[in-house]
Structure formats: structure tokens, C-alpha cells
Amino acid sequence: MKKLVSIAALLLIIASFSLFIYRPAKETIIFFPIHPHVTFSEAKTTLQLQPQKRDGKYSLLWSASSSLDRDAYLRQDISLLFADGRLVDRLAKWKTNSQTLTQEKIVAARDSRFFQAISFHHGELHEGEMITSSQTMTSDYLYVIDSPYSPLVSFHRAATQDEKEWQNVLNKTTAEFLQHTSESLLSHFSIQKQQYYSLYLPDLIVYNEQPLPDLSMEKTQEIIGKLWEGLYKSYFLGIKKEDGSILSPIGSTTPLILISKDYSHLLVLTETKDGEKIRLTQQISR
């Protein structure tokens, strides 16, 4: 009887240990050559203002969804939400042997703000020993006017004179803030901006449909895919400093992307919520 109890206890320990070993780890985004015939049948990012305020705050419904035209070994979507030039929040979801991902989140905020969201949709495909991928980006933006002198309102494109004035104010405020931050970062790291193509992360969406200067669309997509791979590891999950420590990206400035004009490397510059200046470097393969 004692032997049976001992054997049962041993089996329980082994089973528990096995469950611990095989618990899935957090996935990562890895770029593989783009599959020429696999595409996203649908992909979108949306920002919608909810009608009611609560405790002086309004709510924003933020969603990101995508559907591949076939099952993928691994489906992954990540999304970043910025307001007035700073990161507000993150979304991420992954699923194996799937086509479709859908995720959404309610974000509370106050005051008039300019929101920008950009998402990266990725699929990893396995065919025998060959591994390929499919990718696309989507984005959305929204102006929210929260003033004590007028009703709560939101818009994508200004339709009235008041909305046009608010849009100009919010655009100018965000642009001036990012310009000041970028100049400070470039000076701090002694970077010659004229040697780079520069853009802020939400503007990367334009290269969904067009190549980088003097590059093929294939090479452009490779650079974008590897950029998002690096952003996920070293920004989205936490900003990795040179000493190995990790800082939260929430509250950091919208990343400035600098792509060297000789396409040897790219830089990602940002400033954390606490004012620490960060430079991430990625080599570009020939």
C-alpha cells in the first residue's frame, strides 16, 4: 500500500513538473521572407469616442483586428496608441494555427487631445521546412475636443470652423513638442539628421503601399518587418537600456525613426517619461 502511495505521489510530481515545463512562453515577432501569395483579406485599426463621460473623463474604444487569407502557424498583432506625441497604451495578441485576431480596449482620458494609433499585423507560415511570413500595417487617428465651453466631440476631419481651429491647435502643439524633443535627442547623440530619412512611427504607414527611396518594395517590406521585430523586443515590451535594465515605454515620446540614406542601419530615438534619452540601433542587411 505504501508503495502504491509513493508511486502515485511520484507520478503527481512528474505531472506537475511536466506542466511547468510545457507552459507556453511569451511569443516574439520574427521576420521571415515575405510569402508572395499570402495576403491579409482584412486588417484595420479604429479609434472611437464613447458618448458618456465618467468622473470627469471620457472613454475611447481602441480596436485592432486582422484576418489572413489562410491559417498561419502563428498570428500576431500589436498596436500602439499615442496622444499628443506620447505613448498612452499598448495592445498585443497572438494565436497559433489561426487566421483572425481581434482585440480592443477602453482607454480613459481627459482634456482635448490628438490620438494616433498604429498596428502591425503579422503571420508566420510553415510549409515543410520553409518558413515565410505575411505582414501589413494599419492606423487611425482621432481628435477629441473636451472643453468646458462646448459639448464633448470627436472627429477625423474637421467639418466646422471650431473643429478646424482645434485641429490646428492640437496639430501645432504635437508637432512643436516632437520637434523640440527630436532636436534634443539628435543633439544628445550627435546625430547628423541630413544623413537619414526621418519619420515618426505613426507615419510609417505610408510604406505599406510605396517603397523607401531607391529601394524595391520587397526590400522595403524586409526593413519594415525587421524594424517591427526590433520595436517589439526593445520598445513595446519595455525599453532596453545599454546596461540591460528595462524601462516602461508608457509616457515615452513617439519614436523618431531614422533610416540611413546608404541603408546600412536605422536608429530609433525616444525619450522616456522620466526624461531619459534612448537610442536603439539596428543594422540593415544587404
Image (cartoon, rainbow, N blue to C red):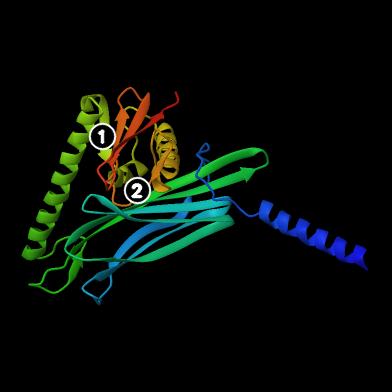
Residue 209, given in percent of the width and then of the height, sits at 35, 43
Residue 249 - label: 2
Is residue 216 positioned above or below 105 on the image?
above
Q: Are marks 2 and 1 in contact (CB under 8 Å)?
A: no
- Disc 1, SS: strand
Residue 228, given in percent of the width and then of the height, sits at 41, 42
Residue 213 seen in render = no
Rounded to the nearest angstrom, the CA distance separating label 2 from label 1 is: 21 Å
Amino acid type of the residue tagged 2 in the rendering? Pro
| Quarter holding residue 98 | bottom right
Q: Label 2: few (<14), some or many (≥20) within 10 Å?
A: many
Residue 12, given in percent of the width and then of the height, sits at 78, 62
Residue 198 - label: 1
Is residue 207 positioned above or below 167 on the image?
above
- Disc 2, SS: loop
Q: Nearer the viewer, residue 155 or 280?
A: 280
Q: Label 1: few (<14), some or many (≥20) within 10 Å?
A: some
Q: Report whether 260 appears left or right of 228.
A: left
